Image: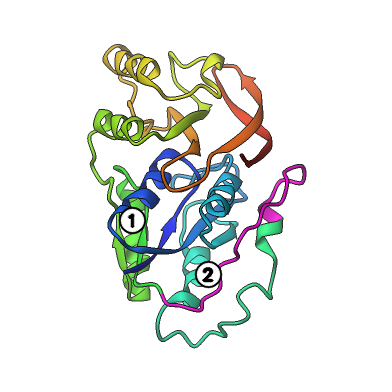
Amino acid sequence: MDVAVLSSGGKDSSYAVWWAIMKGWNVRLIVTLRVTSEDSMMYQLEGTAMAGLQAAAANIPWLPILQEEENGTDSLEQALIPFVAGSSWPRSNTWSRKNQAAAMWPEDWPWPEIKRATPNRSIQGIVSGALRSDYQRTRIDCMAERLGIHSFSPLWHMPAERHMRNLLEADFDVRFSAVAAEGLDEEWLGKKLNEETLEMLIHLNKTNGLNIDGEGGEFETSVLAAPWFKPLTWTIENHWKRQSGRIRITHASIR
């Protein structure tokens, strides 16, 4: 099966790419949405250009999409239409309207050899890293139904601790890119997920009710290494305000 994977560069979507590859499917493109608003219930906001770097490190075409709406799928659906069998859209003009990759790429990052996604072959499905958000999954499923393609959520209702251990066992290099919960201080920014940090998350789950996988908005992540792409390196700055913070990636490249 030929599929697109919706990816922010974080742990869940990065694992969804790996799942599709392990199924023996052809990942024809990695799709990344950059939401221009300050908040979103559906999409990760920070570090989404990392998904483009992951795609380049795996030699997979990348389809970046700038989206003004916080939580909808209109921009995503319109961008995917040319990749669906039977589409009447011009298949050679996908990038003629606007070079969205350049608009999403930080100025001080080196520009890698990114393959731009062109609809020269149709997809039959879209894969997402949705964990437990009905809000997110329902909208993606409905969009896929309108497009006439399958929707897959391989992590749906995966037990949180099992999911995090799967990442460790598969040698994913997961870093915390944003934190906003009691017990997660500035030292967590840029910290690597390992057995020690996982045990700390499990402890915070028991004492504070923190979601071990961050599904309640407690933290966001970026992935610097995974079985399906060459390792990445980055330079970051911490930005902390009151009881929450996030990193700013000042430089990132393929090792």
Q: Residues within 10 Å of mark 1 (few under 14, many from 20)?
A: many
Q: Identify whether 96 is placed above or below 60.
A: below
- Front residue of 4/172: it is 172
- Check if residue 107 falls in the magenta segment: yes
What is the spatial separation of the Cα atoms under label 1 and label 2, in whole angstroms? 21 Å
Quarter occupied by residue 187? top right
Task: Tell whether label 2 touches label 1 (CB within 8 Å).
Answer: no
Q: Earlier in the sequence, mark 1 or mark 2?
A: 1
Which disc, if any, is residue 97?
none
SS at circle 2: helix
Q: Position of residue 48 (x, y in %)?
A: 57, 46
Query: What range is drawn magenta here?
Result: 103-122
Q: Identify whether 176 is placed above or below 199.
A: below
Q: Identify whether 124 is placed above or below 17.
A: below
SS at circle 1: helix
Q: Position of residue 42 (x, y in %)?
A: 44, 48
Q: Identify whether 45 is placed above or below 77.
A: above
Q: Amino acid at mark 2?
A: Ala
Quarter occupied by residue 126? bottom left
- List the residue tagged with mark 2: 79
Q: Position of residue 226 (x, y in %)?
A: 44, 41
Which disc, if any, is residue 20?
1
Looking at the figure, which quarter contains the C terminus? top right
In this rendering, would 202 be left or right of 30? left
- Check if residue 154 falls in the magenta segment: no
